[in-house]
Image (tube, rainbow, N blue to C red):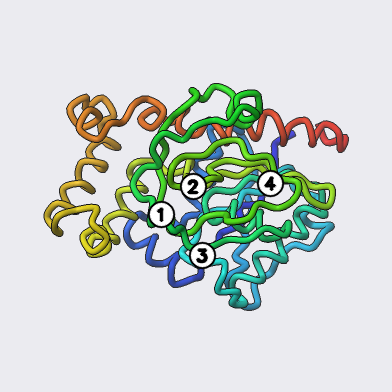
Amino acid sequence: MALRFLIVEGNTRPEREKHKRSFGTAYSESYAAAVAPHAPGAIFDFAYPADAGANLPDGGGLSGYDGVFLTGSALNLYDMTPEVTRQIELMRAVYASGTPAFGSCWGIQVGAAAAGGSVAKNPAGREIGFARRITLTETGRAHPMLAGRPLAFDAPAVHLDIVETPPCETTILAANRMAGVQAAEIRHEGGVFWGVQYHPEFSLGELAAILSRYGERLVREGFCADLDAARAYVEDIRALHEDPSRADLAWRHGLDDEVLVPARRTREIANFIAAAVVPTKAARGRA
């Protein structure tokens, strides 16, 4: 029987449309495309809790899914606007349903807040382009979410906020100098959530599309000397997407196969499906 997933898009409609204009799809659609190779024949539904009046599944509806994925978002969780609080409430319902969930960036922040943790602006500043030297904790080395990852690796990343205070039942699996929580398992109200602060679902093409909208901020925050340098950086990332064998560009930007090879970049997603989704489906008698 095919797996059935719910992709929860964290963005508002204007942000979804902006991403479609620069990349061709919404974040939730590209997330589904990243999941699909690891779950052939999977069925995907989409939810948009940032939209007022959105039709969101209740507890019974959520328990009908085999897994839930939470995308990134341009929102800031600590603003606690209705666009934010609806997503926290939905995540609380996901926990209560017992359906395993996985989230990236904004996703781990929502997973933490829904279980009693807190999120804040990162005092170390923005982490953008790639999160460098994400290092597994001792527990993370044995955790199935990070199976196959080296002890330290890089991954696509775009975030200013971080999980400041993890919830009580949190196991931190990876960290780096920019964030004390780069990967974690959170248990709450009988549910389990696996999340990462980085973006394993981002292709380099999608990352380039996002970075192309950050030009002035990259200059203002000191990442690039000027707009020409920002544009050149984006073009290098786009060129690597089109031809991952470009050893010159990989060397220039310090990238290896953990980023360049899709099956390795999306390893956490594959592990989530194999180690959390499939066993839960079997336990529920839906194998």
Question: In the image, residue 283 lies at what x, y percent?
Answer: 86, 33
Q: Is residue 174 left or right of residue 244?
A: right
| Residue 101 badge | 4
Query: Is 73 in front, or is 244?
Result: 73
Q: Earlier in the sequence, mark 3 or mark 4?
A: 3
Question: In the image, residue 222 lies at what x, y percent?
Answer: 23, 56
| Residue 179 badge | 2
- Residue drawn 67% across and 48% down? 68
| Residue 124 badge | 1
Report the Cα–Cα distance between label 2 and label 1.
Answer: 8 Å
Q: Nearer the viewer, mark 2 or mark 4?
A: 2
Mark 2 touches mark 1? (CB < 8 Å): yes
Q: Earlier in the sequence, mark 2 or mark 1?
A: 1
Report the Cα–Cα distance between label 1 and label 3.
Answer: 24 Å
Q: Nearer the viewer, mark 1 or mark 3?
A: 1
Mark 2 touches mark 3? (CB < 8 Å): no
Mark 2 burial class by Cα count in 10 Å: few <14, some 14-19, many 20+: many
Q: What amino acid is at disc 1?
A: Ala
Image quadrant assignment for residue 102: top right
Mark 1 touches mark 3? (CB < 8 Å): no
Q: What amino acid is at disc 2?
A: Ala
Q: Of helix, strand and loop, which one carries label 3?
A: loop
Q: Earlier in the sequence, mark 2 or mark 3?
A: 3
Q: Earlier in the sequence, mark 4 or mark 1?
A: 4
Residue holding disc 3: 11
Q: Of helix, strand and loop, which one carries label 1?
A: loop
Image quadrant assignment for residue 241: top left
